[in-house]
Image: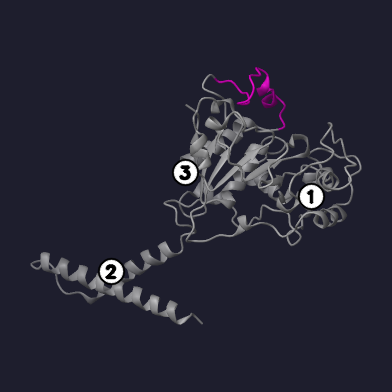
Amino acid sequence: MLPSWKKNMKMFVLALLFVITITSFLLNYTNNAPIMTWDPKQMVYQFSEQVKKLMKYARRPCSCNTCISEQEVSPWFDERFNQTMQPFLTSRNAFIPKESYRWWLKLQGERSPKGINETIQELFEVIPGDGDHLLERSSSRCRRCAVVGNSGNLKQSQYGQEIDNHDLVFRMNRAPTAGFESDVGSKTTHHFVYPESYRELQENVSMILIPFKILDLRWVVSALTNGTINRTYVPVVRKIKANKDKILVYHPHFIKYVYDNWLQHHGRYPSTGFLSIIFSLHICDEVDLYGFGADSKGNWHHYWENNPSAGAFRQTGVHDGDFESNVTWTLSSVDKLRIFKGR
């Protein structure tokens, strides 16, 4: 049963709507007396329409002007967005469907992978397996997020303060901020990495591991304990100083969802940047993208370096950068996120 104050509030709102409807009807009747007749059916219709508007507003998933997860705004978006997908691998959400598991195992081709169930059990003996407050949703909240890529188009952008004003700031891979604060900001709440792209993080930053193989999960356990793993397909950091209580793991099944629903099997698997973007759609109410794409001269490079060959990854076929970019711009065109291209 509803608490008494909720019942009273509901009755008050309905009564207020009824008064507004009657008043509106009488004013309309007065102004149009020669051609209007008293029609109780019309009154009921107007009242029901007001109630529908109220109920629609009450069901909105957030308090922002626009909410990412709001349905029936874009058929294109609704066809791809699955609100039930959970982005985190946790002790309660550790199941990986067989099809997704087989696909995931092939991403970086381990020769003799350790058992996934044993690995996950060991993982959650070292880090918490209870998810994160990010999964909490509230119709009274407007969670604004900045997803900050590493493009050279951030140079001289002066986006720093704007980025830091967001509730959550997601960064990825090596992304330095020291010395670049005016353009990229200094705030980081969550940082996406995989073993080969790891960098030391501040104590208050949550590390989100994107695992592309079982060895990546084992690396986390090793790097927080005995440090026995120092190589995957390249040398990796043996020990890390990350706050183990703030380590989260991107779900392999969610990676497959991104590949199936959003990339429609373009490329071999999604890039870290694109995985971060789709992740943000499920966590945030408003999303702003910074540092994605080429710079104003068409060059692909990181904002902290001037490497003319930095865009070579686009030729490997591992990630379909053009298709990912097209999807991102489509998301912008249907008002599900905003893209800041640099100045």
Question: What residue sits right under mark 1 in the picture?
Answer: 101
Local SS, label 3? loop
Q: Which percent across, then down, holds residue 295?
A: 55, 24
Residue 310 shown in magenta: yes
Local SS, label 1? helix
Judge by depth and name the residue closer to the eye, 129 or 187: 187
Mark 2 to mark 3: distance in Å?
31 Å
- The dot on residue 46 is 2
Circles 2, 3 touching at the beta carbon (< 8 Å): no
Q: Residue type at mark 2: give it.
A: Gln
Q: Which percent across, then down, holds residue 284?
A: 55, 50
Q: Which percent across, then down, holds residue 308?
A: 65, 17
Range drawn in magenta:
298-318
Circles 3, 1 touching at the beta carbon (< 8 Å): no
Residue 152 occupies which quadrant of the picture?
A: top right
Local SS, label 2? helix
Pointer 2 or 3: first along the chain: 2
Residue most extreme to the left: 34
Q: What residue do we see at 59% from left, 60% from top? A: 136
Pointer 2 or 1: first along the chain: 2
Colour mapping: one colour
Q: Residues within 10 Å of mark 3 (few under 14, many from 20)?
A: some
Above or below: residue 193 compared with residue 322: below
Asked whether residue 42 is in view, the answer is: no
Q: Please tell me how many numbered marks the rendered image carries.
A: 3
Mark 2 to mark 1: distance in Å?
53 Å
- The dot on residue 334 is 3
Pointer 3 or 1: first along the chain: 1
- The dot on residue 225 is none
Residue 238 occupies which quadrant of the picture?
A: top right
Mark 3 to mark 1: distance in Å?
32 Å
20 lies left or right of 123: left
